[in-house]
Image: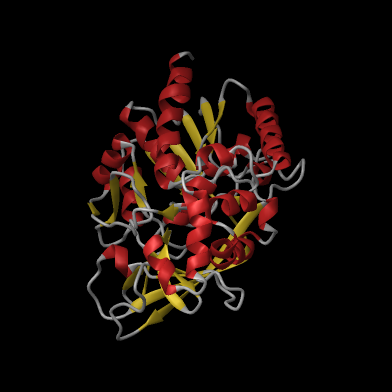
Amino acid sequence: MTRVLIVGAGLTGCTLAWRLAQEGVATTLLERSEVPGGLIRSGHLGGVLYEPHGSHIFHTEDEEVWKLANAMTPFREYRHRVDIVVEGRILNWPILLSDIDAQSRSEEIKAELEERRGLDAEARAAAADFEEWCLELMGPILYERYIKPYTEKQWGRPAKTLSAQWAPRRVSVRWDNDPYLFADPFQGWPAGPNGYTDLIDGLLESKGVSVQTGVDVTVETLDEHTTGADLVVLTCPLDVFAGHRFGTLDWRGIDVRSVHIPHVEQAQGAMVVNYPGLEYPFIRIHETKHASGQKCEGTVLGFEFTGAPTRYYPIELPENRQLNDRYQNLLRDEIGPERTFFAGRLANYLYIDMDDCMRQALDAAEGEVLPALRGR
């Protein structure tokens, strides 16, 4: 008998099913797509392992999550470095002091940076909009070159209208010239033949976990699937699940168009190269082979375009947060407040990394779902 029904078989839903299986709890995952795994699922093109939805780097401070991921599939050591094209030169992202001399107006830039040394970035994020936060961090010259055009291409709106709350995690000036994007103690990329698909498959191999793909379930049709289920966990977009009853949540989507390049081991100098200039129609190019370590002829480049009707980045505005909260309240009322739970980036309308998705799943299992089952 299925005791827990999970709607959505992305990383959060699969991790939650795995954790419940360790306690002997039977679960069924319902997934709209034809395969589980969501945006992190890897693929092959021309024999080359690649990521159809853009680069995913597993990096975390959470040792429990890191050990769990490695128990599902081995990871190879990989530290993520990103290039960026500025004034026709390939430089490092984040901004390095050692790259300033390679640019025009370098003395002006150094003076602007020196004025801002010691900025409390975290404190500023609570008070400033995104543009103001960046200007306070680096000054106008670097902001106009590295940040503003890229950000406005990515989000499709003026940078000043965006929240600064996520900026400290994504924008920085490296005074120590550390070229790597992440400082987390645990970092890597799956070492198996199928990339992140091996992670998903490992989570779903547990006894008592059942997956049904190609199932487009909504709150109106949920009863057709909940026979025998004690609890329901939603990891899906709630506006879609509720039939857009209160309107549609805003997301910023991307479209990655992948091309197989034969007879070339690697086609660029880093896994990701950012193209902030408005003269480029795409915002970055991905090349998975830098992380996978795969040895084969040819490579795959993924050109990332913005504005697609996909759910990658939530638009962090108060009205959107309120709308998602309203959907959560509605679904608790209609499904049952004591048997309805939410987990993951889609159901909670959050931009979170892979380790956070897995952590939310573990916390939901241990802090909500398992106690609720024990109380029945």
Question: Picture coordinates of residue 168 (x, y %)?
Answer: 50, 46
Give the residue drawn at x 45%, y 65%.
Answer: 52
The answer to whether 211 is drawn above or below residue 274 in the figure is above
Asked if residue 200 can be seen in this view, the reply is no
Question: Picture coordinates of residue 95 (x, y %)?
Answer: 44, 60
Q: Which residue reaches farthest bottom?
A: 263
Question: Picture coordinates of residue 98 (x, y %)?
Answer: 37, 64
Q: Nearer the viewer, residue 138 or 234?
A: 138
Q: Residue 357 appears in which quarter of the rendering?
A: top left
Q: Nearer the viewer, residue 213 or 300?
A: 300
Report the colour scheme: secondary structure
The quadrant of the picture occupied by the N terminus is top left
Q: Nearer the viewer, residue 147 or 27?
A: 147
Q: Nearer the viewer, residue 95 or 19?
A: 95
Total numbered badges shown on the rendered structure? 0
Q: Which residue reaches farthest top?
A: 375
Give the residue drawn at x 56%, y 44%.
Answer: 346
Question: Picture coordinates of residue 256 (x, y %)?
Answer: 51, 68
Relative to residue 181, is residue 109 drawn left or right? right
The answer to whether 193 is drawn above or below residue 47 in the figure is above
Asked if residue 206 can be seen in this view, the reply is yes
Give the residue drawn at x 36%, y 76%.
Answer: 268
Relative to residue 36, is residue 323 drawn left or right? right
Give the residue drawn at x 31%, y 80%.
Answer: 298
Q: Residue 261 appears in which quarter of the rendering?
A: bottom left
Relative to residue 88, is residue 61 drawn left or right? left
